[in-house]
Image (cartoon, rainbow, N blue to C red):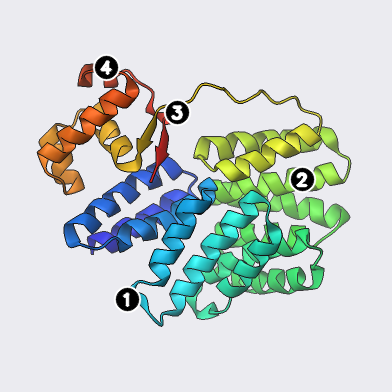
Amino acid sequence: MLPSALLLRLSNRVFAGDLRGAASLAVEADAIGEATGSNFFAQYGALVVEPFRGQETTTRQAIETVTHDRMLQGEGKVTTATQWAAAVLHNGLGRYEEAYAAAERGCENPQELGLSLQSRVELVEAAVRLGRTAHAAEAARAIEEMAQVSGTAWALGNSAATRALVSEGQAADSLHQEAIEQLDASQARMDSARARLRYGEWLRGEQRRAEARAQLSAAHQMLSEAGAEAFAERARRELQAAGVKMRKRASASPAVLTAKEAEIARLAQSGFTNPEIAARLFLSPHTVEWHLRKVFAKLGISSRKEIGSMRLEGVVTTS
Protein backbone atom coordinates (compact mmCIF):
# COMPACT_ATOMS: atom_id res chain seq x y z
CA MET A 1 0.00 0.00 0.00
CA LEU A 2 2.83 2.43 0.86
CA PRO A 3 4.34 2.58 -2.66
CA SER A 4 0.94 3.16 -4.28
CA ALA A 5 0.00 5.87 -1.78
CA LEU A 6 3.40 7.50 -2.23
CA LEU A 7 3.11 7.59 -6.02
CA LEU A 8 -0.43 9.00 -5.84
CA ARG A 9 0.76 11.77 -3.53
CA LEU A 10 3.71 12.40 -5.83
CA SER A 11 1.36 12.93 -8.78
CA ASN A 12 -0.76 15.23 -6.63
CA ARG A 13 2.25 17.41 -5.80
CA VAL A 14 3.20 17.66 -9.50
CA PHE A 15 -0.21 18.96 -10.54
CA ALA A 16 -0.23 21.26 -7.52
CA GLY A 17 2.92 22.84 -8.96
CA ASP A 18 5.26 21.51 -6.28
CA LEU A 19 7.92 19.67 -8.28
CA ARG A 20 10.42 19.94 -5.45
CA GLY A 21 8.01 18.27 -3.06
CA ALA A 22 7.33 15.63 -5.69
CA ALA A 23 11.07 15.07 -6.15
CA SER A 24 11.37 14.56 -2.40
CA LEU A 25 8.72 11.85 -2.57
CA ALA A 26 10.54 10.33 -5.55
CA VAL A 27 13.58 9.91 -3.30
CA GLU A 28 11.42 7.98 -0.83
CA ALA A 29 10.18 5.85 -3.73
CA ASP A 30 13.81 5.23 -4.68
CA ALA A 31 14.52 4.14 -1.11
CA ILE A 32 11.60 1.72 -1.21
CA GLY A 33 12.95 0.37 -4.49
CA GLU A 34 16.35 -0.24 -2.92
CA ALA A 35 14.73 -1.99 0.04
CA THR A 36 12.60 -4.21 -2.19
CA GLY A 37 15.13 -4.80 -4.94
CA SER A 38 13.11 -2.98 -7.60
CA ASN A 39 13.82 0.34 -9.30
CA PHE A 40 10.28 0.59 -10.71
CA PHE A 41 9.02 2.96 -8.00
CA ALA A 42 11.85 5.44 -8.51
CA GLN A 43 11.45 5.36 -12.29
CA TYR A 44 7.69 5.79 -12.12
CA GLY A 45 8.23 8.82 -9.89
CA ALA A 46 10.69 10.21 -12.44
CA LEU A 47 8.15 9.52 -15.20
CA VAL A 48 5.78 12.01 -13.56
CA VAL A 49 8.28 14.64 -12.37
CA GLU A 50 10.99 14.86 -15.03
CA PRO A 51 8.84 15.80 -18.07
CA PHE A 52 7.65 18.98 -16.34
CA ARG A 53 11.23 19.85 -15.49
CA GLY A 54 12.11 19.49 -19.16
CA GLN A 55 14.74 16.85 -18.41
CA GLU A 56 14.93 14.75 -21.58
CA THR A 57 17.56 12.21 -20.54
CA THR A 58 15.95 11.25 -17.24
CA THR A 59 12.47 11.22 -18.80
CA ARG A 60 13.64 8.84 -21.51
CA GLN A 61 15.32 6.63 -18.94
CA ALA A 62 12.10 6.44 -16.94
CA ILE A 63 10.05 5.67 -20.06
CA GLU A 64 12.46 2.89 -21.01
CA THR A 65 12.40 1.31 -17.55
CA VAL A 66 8.62 1.43 -17.13
CA THR A 67 8.03 0.17 -20.69
CA HIS A 68 10.19 -2.90 -20.16
CA ASP A 69 9.13 -3.71 -16.59
CA ARG A 70 8.14 -7.39 -16.60
CA MET A 71 5.36 -6.81 -14.09
CA LEU A 72 3.61 -4.42 -16.50
CA GLN A 73 3.96 -6.23 -19.82
CA GLY A 74 0.74 -6.02 -21.83
CA GLU A 75 -0.75 -3.28 -19.65
CA GLY A 76 -2.40 -0.48 -21.65
CA LYS A 77 -1.65 1.96 -18.86
CA VAL A 78 2.07 1.67 -19.64
CA THR A 79 1.58 3.18 -23.08
CA THR A 80 -0.78 5.80 -21.68
CA ALA A 81 1.57 6.90 -18.90
CA THR A 82 4.81 6.85 -20.88
CA GLN A 83 3.40 8.60 -23.95
CA TRP A 84 1.67 11.24 -21.81
CA ALA A 85 5.06 11.89 -20.18
CA ALA A 86 6.72 12.20 -23.59
CA ALA A 87 4.00 14.59 -24.78
CA VAL A 88 4.45 16.85 -21.73
CA LEU A 89 8.23 16.83 -22.22
CA HIS A 90 8.05 17.78 -25.89
CA ASN A 91 5.36 20.44 -25.44
CA GLY A 92 7.54 22.05 -22.80
CA LEU A 93 10.54 21.97 -25.12
CA GLY A 94 8.48 23.33 -28.02
CA ARG A 95 8.94 20.18 -30.13
CA TYR A 96 5.34 19.93 -31.19
CA GLU A 97 5.59 17.22 -33.86
CA GLU A 98 7.05 14.83 -31.28
CA ALA A 99 4.52 15.97 -28.69
CA TYR A 100 1.66 15.32 -31.10
CA ALA A 101 2.87 11.81 -31.97
CA ALA A 102 3.28 10.89 -28.29
CA ALA A 103 -0.07 12.38 -27.28
CA GLU A 104 -1.86 10.41 -30.01
CA ARG A 105 -0.49 7.19 -28.55
CA GLY A 106 -1.34 8.35 -25.04
CA CYS A 107 -4.98 8.64 -26.11
CA GLU A 108 -5.18 5.09 -27.48
CA ASN A 109 -6.65 3.61 -24.28
CA PRO A 110 -9.49 5.96 -23.23
CA GLN A 111 -10.54 3.51 -20.49
CA GLU A 112 -7.44 4.64 -18.60
CA LEU A 113 -9.28 7.95 -18.01
CA GLY A 114 -6.84 10.17 -16.08
CA LEU A 115 -3.66 10.26 -18.13
CA SER A 116 -5.52 9.35 -21.31
CA LEU A 117 -7.57 12.52 -20.90
CA GLN A 118 -4.46 14.51 -19.99
CA SER A 119 -2.87 13.19 -23.20
CA ARG A 120 -5.76 14.78 -25.12
CA VAL A 121 -4.96 18.11 -23.48
CA GLU A 122 -1.36 17.77 -24.66
CA LEU A 123 -2.60 16.72 -28.10
CA VAL A 124 -4.70 19.87 -28.51
CA GLU A 125 -1.77 22.13 -27.63
CA ALA A 126 0.57 20.36 -30.07
CA ALA A 127 -2.03 20.07 -32.85
CA VAL A 128 -2.86 23.78 -32.75
CA ARG A 129 0.84 24.65 -33.01
CA LEU A 130 1.10 22.39 -36.06
CA GLY A 131 -1.99 23.81 -37.73
CA ARG A 132 -3.97 20.56 -37.36
CA THR A 133 -7.10 22.36 -36.25
CA ALA A 134 -9.58 19.61 -37.12
CA HIS A 135 -7.79 17.08 -34.91
CA ALA A 136 -7.43 19.67 -32.16
CA ALA A 137 -11.14 20.54 -32.28
CA GLU A 138 -12.12 16.86 -32.13
CA ALA A 139 -9.95 16.27 -29.07
CA ALA A 140 -11.27 19.45 -27.42
CA ARG A 141 -14.87 18.20 -27.88
CA ALA A 142 -14.00 14.88 -26.24
CA ILE A 143 -12.46 16.72 -23.29
CA GLU A 144 -15.53 18.94 -22.98
CA GLU A 145 -17.86 15.93 -22.88
CA MET A 146 -15.86 14.36 -20.06
CA ALA A 147 -15.63 17.66 -18.20
CA GLN A 148 -19.39 18.16 -18.26
CA VAL A 149 -19.87 14.72 -16.72
CA SER A 150 -17.20 15.33 -14.09
CA GLY A 151 -18.16 18.90 -13.24
CA THR A 152 -14.99 19.58 -11.23
CA ALA A 153 -13.14 22.88 -11.52
CA TRP A 154 -10.03 21.05 -12.75
CA ALA A 155 -11.92 19.26 -15.53
CA LEU A 156 -13.86 22.37 -16.54
CA GLY A 157 -10.68 24.43 -16.50
CA ASN A 158 -8.85 22.04 -18.80
CA SER A 159 -11.89 21.93 -21.07
CA ALA A 160 -11.99 25.73 -21.30
CA ALA A 161 -8.24 25.81 -21.91
CA THR A 162 -8.41 23.42 -24.86
CA ARG A 163 -11.52 25.03 -26.34
CA ALA A 164 -9.75 28.41 -26.13
CA LEU A 165 -6.97 27.04 -28.33
CA VAL A 166 -9.41 26.05 -31.08
CA SER A 167 -11.48 29.26 -30.86
CA GLU A 168 -10.98 32.78 -32.19
CA GLY A 169 -11.67 36.35 -31.18
CA GLN A 170 -13.78 37.14 -28.14
CA ALA A 171 -14.76 33.49 -27.68
CA ALA A 172 -11.10 32.50 -27.33
CA ASP A 173 -10.42 35.42 -24.97
CA SER A 174 -13.32 34.49 -22.68
CA LEU A 175 -12.35 30.81 -22.64
CA HIS A 176 -8.74 31.56 -21.74
CA GLN A 177 -9.94 33.65 -18.80
CA GLU A 178 -12.44 30.97 -17.76
CA ALA A 179 -9.69 28.36 -17.84
CA ILE A 180 -7.49 30.40 -15.52
CA GLU A 181 -10.35 31.07 -13.09
CA GLN A 182 -11.38 27.42 -12.93
CA LEU A 183 -7.84 26.08 -12.62
CA ASP A 184 -7.01 28.62 -9.92
CA ALA A 185 -10.09 27.44 -8.03
CA SER A 186 -9.00 23.82 -8.39
CA GLN A 187 -5.56 24.63 -6.93
CA ALA A 188 -3.98 22.80 -9.90
CA ARG A 189 -1.18 25.34 -9.98
CA MET A 190 0.79 23.65 -12.75
CA ASP A 191 -2.17 23.71 -15.12
CA SER A 192 -3.14 27.26 -14.16
CA ALA A 193 0.43 28.41 -14.88
CA ARG A 194 0.34 26.72 -18.27
CA ALA A 195 -3.07 28.28 -18.97
CA ARG A 196 -1.54 31.72 -18.35
CA LEU A 197 1.34 30.83 -20.67
CA ARG A 198 -1.05 29.84 -23.47
CA TYR A 199 -3.19 32.93 -22.89
CA GLY A 200 -0.12 35.15 -23.01
CA GLU A 201 1.03 33.52 -26.22
CA TRP A 202 -2.42 34.07 -27.75
CA LEU A 203 -2.53 37.71 -26.61
CA ARG A 204 0.86 38.37 -28.16
CA GLY A 205 -0.39 36.88 -31.41
CA GLU A 206 -3.32 39.30 -31.22
CA GLN A 207 -0.87 42.20 -30.82
CA ARG A 208 -2.16 42.92 -27.29
CA ARG A 209 1.36 43.23 -25.96
CA ALA A 210 0.69 44.85 -22.58
CA GLU A 211 -1.90 42.22 -21.64
CA ALA A 212 0.40 39.50 -22.99
CA ARG A 213 3.25 40.68 -20.79
CA ALA A 214 1.06 40.53 -17.68
CA GLN A 215 -0.01 36.94 -18.33
CA LEU A 216 3.43 35.78 -19.42
CA SER A 217 5.10 37.37 -16.40
CA ALA A 218 2.71 35.55 -14.07
CA ALA A 219 3.26 32.30 -15.96
CA HIS A 220 7.04 32.69 -15.87
CA GLN A 221 7.05 33.33 -12.14
CA MET A 222 4.73 30.41 -11.33
CA LEU A 223 6.56 27.96 -13.59
CA SER A 224 9.98 29.05 -12.32
CA GLU A 225 8.88 28.68 -8.70
CA ALA A 226 7.48 25.24 -9.47
CA GLY A 227 10.72 24.10 -11.08
CA ALA A 228 9.07 23.55 -14.48
CA GLU A 229 12.18 24.68 -16.30
CA ALA A 230 11.22 24.02 -19.92
CA PHE A 231 7.81 25.68 -19.67
CA ALA A 232 9.38 28.59 -17.77
CA GLU A 233 11.89 28.98 -20.60
CA ARG A 234 9.01 29.05 -23.09
CA ALA A 235 7.45 31.87 -21.08
CA ARG A 236 10.79 33.71 -20.93
CA ARG A 237 11.17 33.57 -24.71
CA GLU A 238 7.63 34.85 -25.17
CA LEU A 239 8.30 37.72 -22.76
CA GLN A 240 11.36 38.71 -24.75
CA ALA A 241 9.31 38.59 -27.95
CA ALA A 242 6.74 40.83 -26.23
CA GLY A 243 9.40 43.44 -25.55
CA VAL A 244 10.43 42.59 -21.99
CA LYS A 245 14.15 42.75 -21.21
CA MET A 246 14.84 39.60 -19.25
CA ARG A 247 17.76 39.34 -16.86
CA LYS A 248 20.60 37.16 -17.99
CA ARG A 249 20.91 33.91 -16.12
CA ALA A 250 23.48 33.87 -13.38
CA SER A 251 26.78 32.51 -14.63
CA ALA A 252 27.84 31.04 -11.30
CA SER A 253 27.31 27.28 -11.21
CA PRO A 254 25.22 26.18 -8.23
CA ALA A 255 26.05 23.10 -6.19
CA VAL A 256 24.81 19.91 -7.83
CA LEU A 257 23.37 17.26 -5.52
CA THR A 258 21.79 13.96 -6.42
CA ALA A 259 18.10 13.69 -5.58
CA LYS A 260 18.93 11.49 -2.61
CA GLU A 261 21.60 13.87 -1.32
CA ALA A 262 19.19 16.79 -1.63
CA GLU A 263 16.49 14.96 0.33
CA ILE A 264 18.91 13.94 3.08
CA ALA A 265 20.14 17.54 3.25
CA ARG A 266 16.56 18.83 3.63
CA LEU A 267 15.80 16.33 6.38
CA ALA A 268 19.02 17.21 8.20
CA GLN A 269 18.15 20.89 7.85
CA SER A 270 14.75 20.14 9.42
CA GLY A 271 16.45 18.65 12.49
CA PHE A 272 16.14 14.93 11.82
CA THR A 273 18.96 12.81 13.24
CA ASN A 274 20.88 10.33 11.10
CA PRO A 275 18.95 7.32 12.52
CA GLU A 276 15.65 9.17 11.90
CA ILE A 277 16.63 9.97 8.32
CA ALA A 278 17.74 6.39 7.83
CA ALA A 279 14.39 5.03 9.04
CA ARG A 280 12.47 7.45 6.85
CA LEU A 281 14.43 6.61 3.69
CA PHE A 282 14.98 2.89 4.37
CA LEU A 283 18.75 3.36 4.62
CA SER A 284 21.36 2.54 7.24
CA PRO A 285 22.63 5.36 9.51
CA HIS A 286 26.10 4.72 8.06
CA THR A 287 24.79 5.34 4.52
CA VAL A 288 23.11 8.56 5.65
CA GLU A 289 26.35 9.75 7.24
CA TRP A 290 28.23 8.93 4.01
CA HIS A 291 25.74 10.95 1.93
CA LEU A 292 25.92 13.88 4.36
CA ARG A 293 29.71 14.02 4.08
CA LYS A 294 29.31 14.29 0.29
CA VAL A 295 26.68 17.02 0.74
CA PHE A 296 28.94 19.01 3.06
CA ALA A 297 31.80 18.78 0.55
CA LYS A 298 29.64 19.93 -2.37
CA LEU A 299 28.14 22.82 -0.40
CA GLY A 300 31.49 23.89 1.02
CA ILE A 301 30.43 23.44 4.65
CA SER A 302 31.54 21.16 7.47
CA SER A 303 28.64 20.69 9.87
CA ARG A 304 24.88 20.33 10.38
CA LYS A 305 24.88 23.74 12.03
CA GLU A 306 25.96 25.35 8.77
CA ILE A 307 23.44 23.48 6.65
CA GLY A 308 20.68 24.88 8.85
CA SER A 309 21.23 28.39 7.47
CA MET A 310 21.55 27.44 3.82
CA ARG A 311 18.92 27.94 1.07
CA LEU A 312 18.59 24.55 -0.55
CA GLU A 313 15.90 25.73 -3.01
CA GLY A 314 18.56 26.97 -5.41
CA VAL A 315 20.59 23.77 -5.39
CA VAL A 316 20.49 21.80 -8.64
CA THR A 317 19.57 18.12 -8.32
CA THR A 318 20.30 15.25 -10.65
CA SER A 319 18.93 11.73 -10.76
Residue on which the image places disc 3: 314
Q: CA distance from mark 2 to mark 1?
A: 43 Å
Contact? badges 2 and 3 (CB < 8 Å):
no
Q: CA distance from mark 4 to mark 2?
A: 44 Å
Q: Residues within 10 Å of mark 3 (few under 14, many from 20)?
A: few
**Residue 181 sits above or below residue 306 on the image:** below
Contact? badges 2 and 1 (CB < 8 Å):
no
Q: Nearer the viewer, residue 239 or 5?
A: 239
Q: Secondary structure at mark 1?
A: helix
**Which of the marked residues, 3 or 4, is nearer the chain's N terminus?**
4
Tell me which amino acid carries mark 2. Answer: Glu
Q: Residues within 10 Å of mark 2 (few under 14, many from 20)?
A: many
Q: Nearer the viewer, residue 205 or 47?
A: 47
**Which of the marked residues, 1 or 3, is nearer the chain's N terminus?**
1
Q: CA distance from mark 3 to mark 4?
A: 16 Å
Tell me which amino acid carries mark 3. Answer: Gly
Q: Nearer the viewer, residue 242 or 89?
A: 89
Q: CA distance from mark 1 to mark 4?
A: 45 Å
Q: Secondary structure at mark 4?
A: helix
Q: Which mark is residue 306?
A: 4
Q: Secondary structure at mark 3?
A: helix
Residue at image x 66%, y 23%? 247
Residue on which the image places disc 2: 201
Camera-near label (1 vs 4) is: 1
Tell me which amino acid carries mark 4. Answer: Glu
**Which of the marked residues, 2 or 3, is nearer the chain's N terminus?**
2
Residue on which the image places disc 1: 70
Q: Position of residue 133 (x, y in %)?
A: 80, 68
Q: Position of residue 148 (x, y in %)?
A: 62, 70
For residue 79, say whether it is visible: yes
**Which of the marked residues, 2 or 1, is nearer the chain's N terminus?**
1
